[in-house]
Image (tube, coloured by chain):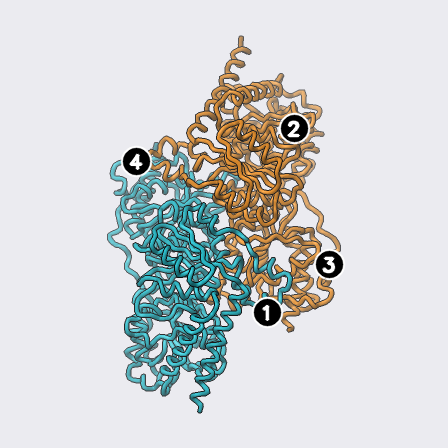
Chain colours: A cyan, B orange
């Protein structure tokens, strides 16, 4: 009885403090050893629980909720390999900077390492991929340990939320009996509650650093602002302000939070840089000498190549944490400071020198961008059905402020190409920490669970297959989502890589990997509305019909991998030609 | 060109040495960064490749092949979270002692830790769950490095195979271009091949240790041999020999490799100990004073409880590696030595003292065992349909030497109860390293890939759902397997635990977790033959019909969780009553 009392009070103190610290959503994968956590979390009035049998999907579902809400989410599982199934999402949370609080149940010390069932070494099992790990003590029934339980919850949540955000891991040994005593009174009052939630902290630079930067930037004539994937609130407005002061065009990644919802500031945005920077004449002519980059490395490969060949006098990477996210190695400085604060402070310092910008630098980018946009629209209106039409149709028919989750590999690239800047907002989300094709369905459904309108997912057939189990959450919780599955029967992105021409007979076996499965059978399994489209008009029609329904809707859009490559290449060639013609016209 | 030449020769030397060291099966999950490994492995004349898009399933598929064959199997994946999906199977391989060679592709050093796509920290990412980790150098084109490539392959395979067997991990950084040059001549001749495969090594004890043990065991009157899960060749015959010399009954776990194929030695085997040891009168009366245990901790919970309450004068755990697998803590000695060698040597030393056994000790166990067996058969013939009938029917209708994979949770327990010792062989396999319900479908299919007759899988609906993706391998490779899915719509084992009575309204949400999915829809998705059984005769009929077909066959056996608990309890009560009546009879 003494142990059961301790189990109850200690775990309840921990669970209550999770709620005190702002946790609202908890995803639980069922198990026996995790019973104390699961039951107390389920019983807590402020915590909403989501049950997902597959721990891999569960962790990605939580990741999606945390990404969408920018709030920490907790996940719970039992001991053993269950915990290892969390690993992919934990890693994505680390590199994607998503606040995730991982709670694993474990055997007590006397049952570890001796072959007891479902017992593995869980100490630091996620290695450096969590920001903080703590092996908890066995529950004890006294004020000091209740306080420790609360301290641990507080620290786990706070560390997950501090810059850079990321996952934390607490491992809980429990002895039997495992069922808490719900007869205890004042279940949520054990231990002293924290008086408040910890304040958020940001990294700041000294005044002298700003002064030095301002001096350096006096000589910049061809500035660029690049905004890569990020979920920072307030960055949009402050980045526009900085761009105006600098006279710099903003190359805005689709995951930057800046490309959509521009509300009058659209002239600042360059959205077709991926196409522009495939043109060597353009690149030669438009060599930036000063760059400020926010967020993670952008999706566009041509932008990466452009940056690599540059030799700018100043290339600043602004990082809200302590990372060194410089995949192209051209940065002259990595400034560890809050991006919004940086924009505001640096805007003030450069406001007097923005006439330093060379002639029509920003206008030239905008003009080229217009040519690219026109070329894109022209090509889409005349080209035979290909994957570009799917992204373009989604772009056209998504309601304002819609949430669209983009799978990795081709979908996020097509969104980069076909989702042009616009005045009304769109929330495009993707797992760009590690760019995996795993857990995409669950991550998207996690987002959808926290929005009040239908959410969207654009995904290929391989990634859709990989996390098919994730659909169980849509079925069990009646989530509203339209999933567009681009079915090209295999790994479409490989057709864009050298393997396609060089791997010969091995290509289909090793890279194409057609799975030949019926999307409709998946829809049947999960009780989803199903639509199939094999051409443009059918897709538009299917999307419209799907938008008129509720629940899980799956649109299978059938495409051909080889044709898709040809048409993407033709599009870029057309834009290239348009730019070249324009360039020649200018020189006349 | 120089790098491509180095990439080709260095990687080919490594791949060729994998084959030289006995690797024959390689499971590859497609990706770009792993192209050099994937293409060279696929091209190697001695290596058979299996392509599985889902890395979690892929690793379990390889684990199944390695378990079934007792041979090392390699797995390959690309960089990023793909590698983390291997983690559950890597952990199972560690604790289940399965030789698995894990090959992950990585970015080169200059692209690590800077936000490059699909780049995570893969250095020691499986922590202590692999036996050996090496971060490989970039490929080089010279004799010294070709030798190092071969050395690394040799060491990775050898370490995986040495006692205790387990996983090893090599991480390969590759630069672009990634496609090897197949125009190079003598692709498999780079570097000096190993002259031979390393000899296997076993742990041995000094003569003095045996002499001391023999002396101690002179006073043993009530010896028991317990054989838990293991895949050691030759243990059966030598364990029978030891049992005869000691006059000790063998409590043989269904995964011991000893319970089936007894060929004339059946009298040595106790197979119904799980039922016997639920009887407190039996336990009180039959207190062993000397125990020798081989293999991992047995499946039976009642055996574990029995061992915990014993106070034997000698309890030896024989471990072929250096582990301390004593979950009950009653061992007086853990002997790190080869079990087969131990049996042979110790048999010779105790042969003269086996008259020391107390009276009818072994016969008493056998008699009780017969009562339990009779009770079991009687109950099965009269009881209404429950999950016991499924295991019993499989037991009856499996052909000799059939391979049956048992899922964890209830299936392996039912097999423990209903699969009685028999003369002809059965190969029962389960993932008992960490006892997870993950990866079961894939592990079973991995086994089936290496046998020439239909393999079997007994699994519940939750575990079946968890690794549903694993079925893709059956579809793509036309594997012959009969899967019996016990569909009790949720987690059946929880109904046997205290949570069932104590969790109240929370029970179905947190533990029962009904998924309400149609097994038939899964069969449709994967093109499997489908059968459904809701009573005994229908199940027998379905099994018979399934056995007449080829390819993937799924039998859904519908049961009820609550009834299942009641009937298991009734069975144990019946056996208990039988034993009590017999005991009273004796005392008369």
Q: Label 2 is found on which chain of the structure?
A: B
**Callout 1–callout 2 Cβ contact below 8 Å:** no
Q: Is residue B164 at all visible to an observer of this figure?
A: no
For label 3, count other residues whose C-alpha is less than 10 Å away and answer few (under 14), some (14-19) or many (20+): some
Kindly state the secondary structure of the residue where label 4 is placed.
Answer: loop
| Residue A478 image position (x, y, % from top left) | 35, 47
**Callout 4–callout 2 Cβ contact below 8 Å:** no
Q: Which is more N-terminal, label 2 or label 1?
A: 1
Discs 4, 2: same chain: no
Nearer to me, B395 or A76: B395
Q: Is residue A542 at all visible to an observer of this figure?
A: yes
Mark 3 lies on residue: B193
Mark 1 to mark 2: distance in Å? 68 Å
Q: Which is more N-terminal, label 2 or label 3?
A: 3
Q: Which mark is residue B177?
A: 1
Looking at the image, residue B5 lies above or below residue A471: below
Q: Label 3 is found on which chain of the structure?
A: B
For label 2, count other residues whose C-alpha is less than 10 Å away and answer few (under 14), some (14-19) or many (20+): some
Discs 4, 3: same chain: no
**Callout 3–callout 2 Cβ contact below 8 Å:** no
Q: Is residue A349 left or right of residue B558?
A: left
Q: Label 1 is found on which chain of the structure?
A: B
Mark 2 lies on residue: B215
Mark 3 to mark 1: distance in Å? 27 Å
Q: Which is more N-terminal, label 1 or label 3?
A: 1
Residue displayed at 36% across by 65% down: A396
Looking at the image, residue A192 lies above or below residue A546: above
Mark 4 lies on residue: A182
**Callout 1–callout 4 Cβ contact below 8 Å:** no
Quadrant of image for the N terminus of chain B: bottom right
Residue displayed at 59% across by 66% down: A499
Mark 1 to mark 4: distance in Å? 62 Å
């Amino acid at each position: 009885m003494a142990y059961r009392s301790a189990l109850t009070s200690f775990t309840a103190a921990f669970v209550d403090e999770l709620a005190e610290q702002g946790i609202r959503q908890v995803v639980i994968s069922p198990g026996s050893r995790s019973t104390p956590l699961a039951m107390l979390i389920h019983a807590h009035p402020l915590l909403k629980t989501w049950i997902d049998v597959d721990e891999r999907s569960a962790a990605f579902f939580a990741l999606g909720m945390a990404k969408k809400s920018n709030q920490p989410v907790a996940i719970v599982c039992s001991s053993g390999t269950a915990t290892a199934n969390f690993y992919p999402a934990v890693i994505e949370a680390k590199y994607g900077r998503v606040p995730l609080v991982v709670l694993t149940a474990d055997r007590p010390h006397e049952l570890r390492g001796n072959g007891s069932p479902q017992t593995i070494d869980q100490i630091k099992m996620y290695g450096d991929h969590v920001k903080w790990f703590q092996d908890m003590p066995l529950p004890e029934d006294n004020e000091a340990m209740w306080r420790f339980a609360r301290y641990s919850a507080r620290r786990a949540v706070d560390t997950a939320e501090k810059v850079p955000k990321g996952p934390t891991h607490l491992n809980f040994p429990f002895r039997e009996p495992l069922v808490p005593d719900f007869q205890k009174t004042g279940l949520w009052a054990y231990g002293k509650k924290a008086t408040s939630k910890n304040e958020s902290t940001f990294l700041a630079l000294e005044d002298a650093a700003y002064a030095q930067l301002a001096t350096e930037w006096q000589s910049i004539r061809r500035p660029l602002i690049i905004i890569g994937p990020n979920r920072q609130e307030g960055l949009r407005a402050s980045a526009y302000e900085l761009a105006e002061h600098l006279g710099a065009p903003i190359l805005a990644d689709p995951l930057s939070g800046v490309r959509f919802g521009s509300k009058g500031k659209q002239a600042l945005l360059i959205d077709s840089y991926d196409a522009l920077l495939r043109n060597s004449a353009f690149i030669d002519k438009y060599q930036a000498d000063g760059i400020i980059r926010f967020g993670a490395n952008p999706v566009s490969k041509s932008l990466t190549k452009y940056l690599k060949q540059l030799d700018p006098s100043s290339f600043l990477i602004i990082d809200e944490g302590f990372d060194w996210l410089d995949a192209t190695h051209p940065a002259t400085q990595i400034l560890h400071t809050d991006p919004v604060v940086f924009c505001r402070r640096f805007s003030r310092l450069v406001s007097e020198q923005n006439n330093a910008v060379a002639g029509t630098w920003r206008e030239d980018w905008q003009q080229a961008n217009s040519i690219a946009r026109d070329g894109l629209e022209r090509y889409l209106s005349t080209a035979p059905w290909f994957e570009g039409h799917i992204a373009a149709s989604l772009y056209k028919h998504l309601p304002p402020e819609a949430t669209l989750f983009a799978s990795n590999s081709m979908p996020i690239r097509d969104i980069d190409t076909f989702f042009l800047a616009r005045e009304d907002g769109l929330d495009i989300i993707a797992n760009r920490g590690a760019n995996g094709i795993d857990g995409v369905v669950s991550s998207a459904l996690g987002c959808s669970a926290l929005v009040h309108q239908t959410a969207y997912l654009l995904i290929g057939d391989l990634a859709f297959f990989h996390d098919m189990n994730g659909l169980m959450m849509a079925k069990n919780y009646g989530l509203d989502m339209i999933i567009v599955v681009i079915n090209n029967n295999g790994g479409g992105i490989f057709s864009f890589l050298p393997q396609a021409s060089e791997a010969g007979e091995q290509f289909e076996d090793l890279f194409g990997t057609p799975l030949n499965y019926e999307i409709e059978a998946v829809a049947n399994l999960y009780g989803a509305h199903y639509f199939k489209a094999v051409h443009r008009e059918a897709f538009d029609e299917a999307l419209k019909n799907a938008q008129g329904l509720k629940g899980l809707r799956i649109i299978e859009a059938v495409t051909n991998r080889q044709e898709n490559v040809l048409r993407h290449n033709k599009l870029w060639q057309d834009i290239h030609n348009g730019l070249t013609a324009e360039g020649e016209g200018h020189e006349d």
